[in-house]
Structures are given as structure tokens and as C-alpha cells.
Amino acid sequence: MLTISQLVITGIDAIAILIIFQHTSSYAGFSLPEVMFLYGTSGVSFAIANAFVGTVDQLGRHIRAGTFDAIMLRPVPALVQVAADQFSPRRLGKLVQAAVVLWVALATLDVHWTADRVALVPVMIVSGVFIFAAVWVLGATYQFLAGEAAEAMNAATYGGNYVTQYPLSILGKEAIRALTWVIPLAFINWMPALYILDQPDPLDLPAPVRLASPLVALLLCLVAAVVWRAGVRHYRSTGS
Amino acid sequence: MDTVIELTDVAKTFTRRHRRPGKIRRTRTTISAVDGLTFTVAAGEVVGYLGPNGAGKSTTVKMLTGILVPSSGRIRVAGLEPARQRSTLARRVGVVFGQRTTLWWDLPLRDSFQLIRHLYRLEPVRYARNLDQLVELLGLGDLLDVPVRQLSLGQRMRGDLAAALLHDPAILYLDEPTIGLDVVSKSAIRQFLLDRNRAQGTTILLTTHDLGDVERLCGRVMVIDHGRLAFDGSLEALRTLVPVPRVLVVDLAAAGPPMAGVEVVRVDGPRQWVTIPAGSSAAALTARLMAGYDVRDLSVEEPSIEDVVHRLYAGQAGAVRTPGLPVPAR
């Protein structure tokens, strides 16, 4: 039931895209199938990452309730235990909806599908999963320092999903720079999409940057792993 | 005997940041929870780890399990460094926090145990054998299908003990295992722990405020105060080191002033409490009092270990501190 309601709710923001294109045939230089492609790739990556590590935002609750102590006593990595806690199939509702949008986009896109472009689609989705997951873990780690920071973290994850659903070129250059170099959400789907859709880069970065998503994902995951370890070492437990 | 727990000059400090009213910048204060702790525990020992609230008991246990990283010093448990090898160590230790369950609140005990089986990757045969044994010894048979949140404190504690022992740990840490339990539950848990120690040679480190636990279980006592070891030895040695006199309770025929020639510590109507001087016997004192007063009833109060520890904290025994004291023969 929840999965279905989730499907309906997330379906509404896909419909918003259709409403925009009722009034215009191009949005920041992107056609309807192209925006749907961005929406679908971001949504699929987000939904998969959410299913695997979404509950790490509960870390603060575990720390406050003292249940993180119990987690630390088990012979399974703490991150795995926090992530696996309260897994819910509800989170897959979003995946179904985003996958449908992506499928429609791929069927209607006016793209010359060369082998490298075809191969880049799964690569960008997997890279996107790891970038979202790393951002989630980084945000969660902040809760080792500040007890309640789930909302700040959601700005980066849910907000990151929202912003990458649309062409980043609707934002100012400063915002795009921040999303490229500070929180590299642009590598989730924007950069590889520029390559696949053969669109101009508003930042005029060198062409290889468009293919850098797997590298960015790897680096970001390494950073997240190091930061998580540091967070665990600075864990202070609660009094008893 | 093999050493299983070894601490060398271990310290743990916490920095706490305060926000002062009207000031934006926060001030930092450093709190020393454990300061220069050195001791070893041999395999098969049952050690009582005593101290007042905030003395550093829980901090020590959390460092021994790797939950907290020591600020300095060296810790080895079963040859491993807890903070770095926490997951490996987790297979060899069991932990019970009396105030907080490690079970899953909404799951029946049976499912909690199943989850633990998966977390520790226990072989089905070994798991079934251990579970049957623990269920029988701890009387959990009727409770297996009850959600943890519906268990009474005593039942939950037995469930927690079973959960901590399913993977046959060689070392068991118990943080206040009998807190809040009634006499019958306490006794059952103490007996279970003694049997476990004798049958399997499980090393047990027990933090407690309940001195009945210590008297019943612990061959060795460590007292920690302000993050330092204030005493390490047998219970008898602690009593000898900090002599607390026995007290004779005298019921007189009528209320009156404190009796003369003896040290009266308390008067309540016709009842008076008289210190039995060190080196003197209760019989001699009784004889003296009987000669001078109309005594109706008499009883002797043994000093509780709580009094002894309290005196030790209060520093009344002077040069009590014995850092790095070798473990006396038991």
C-alpha cells in the first residue's frame, strides 16, 4: 500500500515536467525527452542509493538512544548495520516510477546511439548510486559531531535528487560550479548526460570531465569511508 | 594462567563544549574519565569492578570492547587492540548492559537470537546446542515468543545474558547485571554466572553497585575512583585494609542516655548501637554491658562491603592507593 502511495506521490513531480512542456517545447535548451532522461537517471540512482543506505540518517537517533553501543559490539561493520536497519520496500516505489520515466525517455530520445553512449547509461547510473550513497554517509557522519543533523543531510540528498532532475543550466554558473567542485552532484547525471545528449557545457570544462563520473564516485566513496572511520573513532557514547 | 585483559597506563579524556549565556564562542573543558589505569586480568577470573557513579567504570568497559578509543595508553584483550580490531574481538566477548538491552525491542526473543546467529555467522548445529542449553539454564522456554518490550526486567536480563553468550565468548563484561532485579532473579543470575565461569572458564568482569554480586561472585575486587585504581585485591584484603568495626545492637529495657564506657554510635529510644573495638570480641563487650545495664536483646551487625568501599573513597584509610599492585594469590 505504502509502495503504491509512494508511487503516486513521486509520480506527481514527474507530471510537473509534463505541465512545464505544455507551455514550452524547450526548457533551458533541453527537450522533453532530454529532461525526462535527466529525471530518470537521477531518480533511479537516488532510489537505489536510498534503498541501500537511506537509513544512515537514523544514526543520530541510534547515538542518542544508546543503540549505537550495541551496534558497535557486533562483528559486522557498523555502517552495514545502520544501513540495514528498518529496510522498507516502500523505498522501491520511487525506483519503479523513475525507471518508467527513464524507459520512456530512452525510447523517445533523439540521440545517435553510439556504443560509448549506450555503455555510458548504466555507468552513469551506477556512478550516481555511489555518489548519492557517499553523500548520505558523509551527511550521517556529521551526526557524530552534531547530534541532530538529519535535516541538513536531507538537503544534500533529497535536495540533490531534486536539483539533478532538471538541467543544471537553469541555475547560475556559481551554483553549477558548486555542484561540480564542492558537492559533486553534477557528476551524478549532468556531466555524462551532456556527453550522451551532445549538449554544450555552461562551464566550458574540458571534454573528459563529462566522462569523469566513475572516478568522482570512487574518490567520493573513499572520502566517505575515511570520514566515517574518523567519526566512529570519535564516537563518545552516552552515559549510563 | 594466561592474561586475557591487559591495560597499560590507559587514559580517556572527553572535551565538553559549553555555550555560556550571552556569548557566542563556546568554552571547552577537558574531563578526565580514566587516568593512568593499569591492570591485568587472567583467564578464568571473576573480577568485580567497583566505584561510585562517574568513577570511570563504564568508560573502561567501553574501551575494552572498542566502543571508545583510549586517549592514550595500551589495551590488549585476547591479544587484540579493541579500537582497531573491534569486529574480530566482538566474536570473543559478550557484553550485557544492565540498563539497556542489546536485543531488538519489537522482536520476540527467538527472532532476536536468530538475528544474532546471522550477525555472528554461527553454524546451525552449534547455535542450536548453545540456544537449548541457555534456554534451559536461564528458564527462557516460555518467553521465546514474547516481544522483548513485553518482558519484565528480570526476564529481559536473562534474555540479554543468553544473547551475549550464544557465540561462546571467552570474556564476559557485565555492566550492572542485577540492577533493579528482585532477590530471586538476582540469585538466579549469580548462580548462572558462577556455573558458567566454572564450567567454561569464562573470564568475567563485572561492574556493579550491588555488593551482594561481589560477595557472591568475585574472587578479586578492583576499586576505581576518579579514573584511577584505588584498590586491587581480594575482598578479604579490602576488608583488612580498610577496617570497618562491627557494631553491637543493644536493646535495653528502657530508653536512656548513651551507655557509659563504650563507643555508642547511635541511639534510638531503648535501642543503642555500640562499636565493637578492633581486637576485642563481641562476647567481652556483651559481658561488660550485661553487668551494667538491663539488656533485653542483642545482635551483631557485620560491616557491609558498601561501608568498606565508602571508607576507601572517603580516603579515611590514608595511604590506600596501591597503583600497579600485583594480584594477590587467591
Image: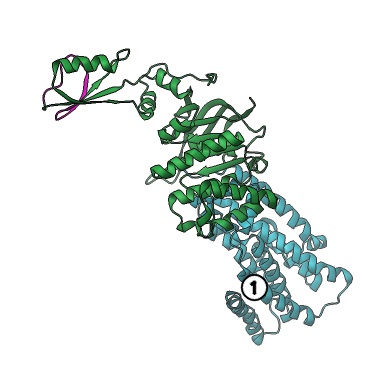
Chain colours: A cyan, B green
- Span shown in magenta: B256-271
Residue A86 lies in the magenta-colored region: no
Please tell me which residue is depicted at 18% across the width and 14% down the height of the picture.
Answer: B261
Q: What residue occupies the far bottom of the structure in this picture?
A: A22
Left or right, B313 with respect to B70, comes to left
Please tell me which residue is depicted at 83% across the width and 77% down the height of the picture.
Answer: A111
Foreground: A147 or B130? B130
Element at label 1: helix
Left or right, A138 with respect to A63, comes to right
Please tell me which residue is depicted at 45% across the width and 46% down the height of the picture.
Answer: B99
Give the answer, above or below, for where B2 lies relative to A136: above
Q: Chain of mark 1?
A: A
Residue position marked by numbered label 1 in the rendering? A94
Q: Is residue B43 visible?
A: yes
Quarter of the image containing the N terminus of chain B? Answer: top right
Choose top left, top right, bottom left or bottom right for residue A206: bottom right
Q: Main SS type for the magenta part?
A: loop
Number of numbered discs:
1
Q: Position of residue A124 (x, y in %)?
A: 77, 65
Please tell me which residue is depicted at 61% across the width and 47% down the height of the picture.
Answer: B166
Q: Is residue A138 visible?
A: no
Foreground: B220 or A15? B220
Q: Position of residue A21 (x, y in %)?
A: 67, 84
Q: What residue occupies the far right of the structure in this picture?
A: A115
Q: Residues within 10 Å of mark 1 (few under 14, many from 20)?
A: many
Foreground: B171 or B272? B272
Q: Position of residue B104 (x, y in %)?
A: 54, 56
Left or right, B221 with respect to B312, comes to right
